[in-house]
Amino acid sequence: MNFPGYDTVQVVPHDEHVLLATLNRPPVLNALNTQMGRDLFDLFSRLTADAGGVRCVVLTGAGKAFCAGGDLKERDGMTRAQWQAQHELFERAFVALLECPTPVVAAVNGPAFGGGFEMALCCDFLYAAASAKFALPEVKLGIMPGGCGTQNLARAVGERRAKELVLTGRAFTAQEALAWGAVNQVCAPDALLPDALATARAIADNAPLSVRQARKSIHYGLQVDLLTGYRFEIEAYNRLVDTEDRHEGVRAFNEKRKPDFQGR
């Protein structure tokens, strides 16, 4: 799949089925500006419309940071209308990431503050370098998280911990994030990207339609009661029964070989 040359996000194929997307404004710690909002919205909208051969994405940051949050220099002096117009663009980008049917793994290589942490939380799960730091410090600036942060963080770490972190705005470490359930794995800095890409590769080796349906079942099932979620799960399951990949998976198992999944 071909992507345009984005100004703020570098997009390169890692292999046939894994895409590496890198936030690329290192001089300002990859701060989220209007153009990055446009680029991210376009990237994840394209992946939603037609991912081509892409089966998993790893999202990371260039340089020393993942993303320092909103670019406050760009925002300085904005009118209310300008601020809200920009934020609506950010909202669209966050939702496009959150709803992207292709799994997205965040590889948090450094500070992930404010909108940067919210972006990581919109991914399906997170790996973090041991040196990474996290915070939602918006209350220190007279605003509050507005990139699904209050929702995703509470779902990850629980209501009481989320309230503590959001209402104080304090920073916390990768080890604390791991203990609380905000990240899946803490890695040595030089192992972060290889580990995240290896996990993406493991996901990409599985039946892509099965991965998408299972991801969707978890994502939406958590928003409803158990039995409604189970009914959603069965609907998702039944869509896989007559796929070519299901037949191929069973054949490969019985023939003791690796399956050749085609996403059909």
Image: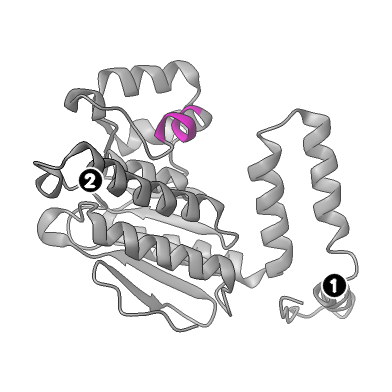
Q: Relative to 214, say whether 53 is above or below.
A: below
**Residue that mark 1 sits on:** 243
**Residue 153 lies in the magenta-colored region:** yes
Residue 169 lies, in percent from the top left, at: 25, 24
Q: Residue at x 37, y 46 (%)?
A: 88
Q: Which residue is drawn at 78% across and 80% down?
A: 257
Q: Give the range drawn in magenta.
A: 149-154
Q: Residue at x 33, y 42 (%)?
A: 117
SS majority, magenta: helix
Res. 146 mark: none
Residue 76 lies, in percent from the top left, at: 10, 42
Label 2: few (<14), some (14–19) or many (≥20) C-alpha neighbours in 10 Å = few
What is the distance, in whole Å, between disc 1 and disc 2 at their CAs? 48 Å
**Residue 168 lies in the magenta-colored region:** no
**Residue that mark 2 sits on:** 82
Q: Relative to 258, say whether 63 is above or below.
A: above
